[in-house]
Amino acid sequence: MKKIDALLSEYGESHQHSTNKAIHWICVPLIFFSVVGLIASIPAEPLQGLMEGSPYANWATLVLVLVIVYYVSLSIPLAIGMMLFGVLCLFAVNLIVRLDVAPLWLVCVIIFVVAWIGQFYGHKVEGKKPSFLKDIQFLMIGPAWLMHFIYKKIGIPY
């Protein structure tokens, strides 16, 4: 069994209840997005010289490259999907910045807190602890777990 299959299977063990699954479909992408936004909020003057004037010259872009390297080590097809989602998150982050309705960090903190409340409620319904309490690596597996369902639905092997 490939490592990614074992990780997805183990993650899935504590995500069987339909309510918990539904909550994860909403909250996991929101948490991923909010983390991207929080990291993008960190001042990035050293990176500005590399991509002068680009709204993507931020720490989130750099961290997402490292995250994608992790996903590549597990599954190239899933890494491609996660890269596309990461790019979508970067676009959304830049939209929030351009709209200037509230500081990016504040929007992301609110999303992060509300989404984690949802996650813990889902696990209360499930009756099982979140997987990341056993292995921190599962914080990265959650988004890939959702992506693998999308891949299965459209017939892309991962």
Image (cartoon, rainbow, N blue to C red):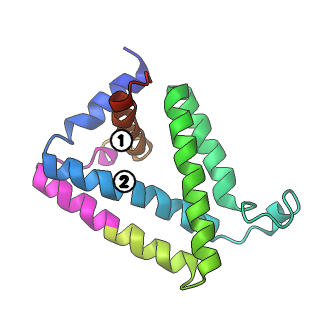
- Residue projecting furthest to the bottom: 101
Q: Is residue 88 left or right of residue 16?
A: right
- Residue name at image x 44 percent, y 44 percent: 140
Q: Which residues are magenta?
A: 115-133
Q: Quadrant of the C terminus?
A: top left
- Residue name at image x 63 percent, y 51 percent: 63
- Residue name at image x 43 percent, y 21 percent: 157
For mark 1, does the 10 Å Cα neighbourhood hold few (<14), some (14 to 19), or many (20 or more) residues? some
Circle on res. 28: 2
Residue type at numbered disc 2: Val
Answer with the quarter of the image where residue 154 lies.
top left
Q: Is residue 119 left or right of residue 85?
A: left
- Is 97 in the magenta? no
- Is 119 in the magenta? yes
- Residue 115 in picture, x, y percent from top left: 33, 65
What count of labels does the image hold?
2
Answer with the quarter of the image where residue 142 lies.
top left
Residue type at numbered disc 1: Leu
Q: Quadrant of the N terminus?
A: top left
Q: Earlier in the sequence, mark 1 or mark 2?
A: 2
Q: Main secondary structure of the magenta part?
A: helix
Contact? badges 1 and 2 (CB < 8 Å)? yes
For mark 2, does the 10 Å Cα neighbourhood hold few (<14), some (14 to 19), or many (20 or more) residues? many
Report the residue marked by disc 1: 146
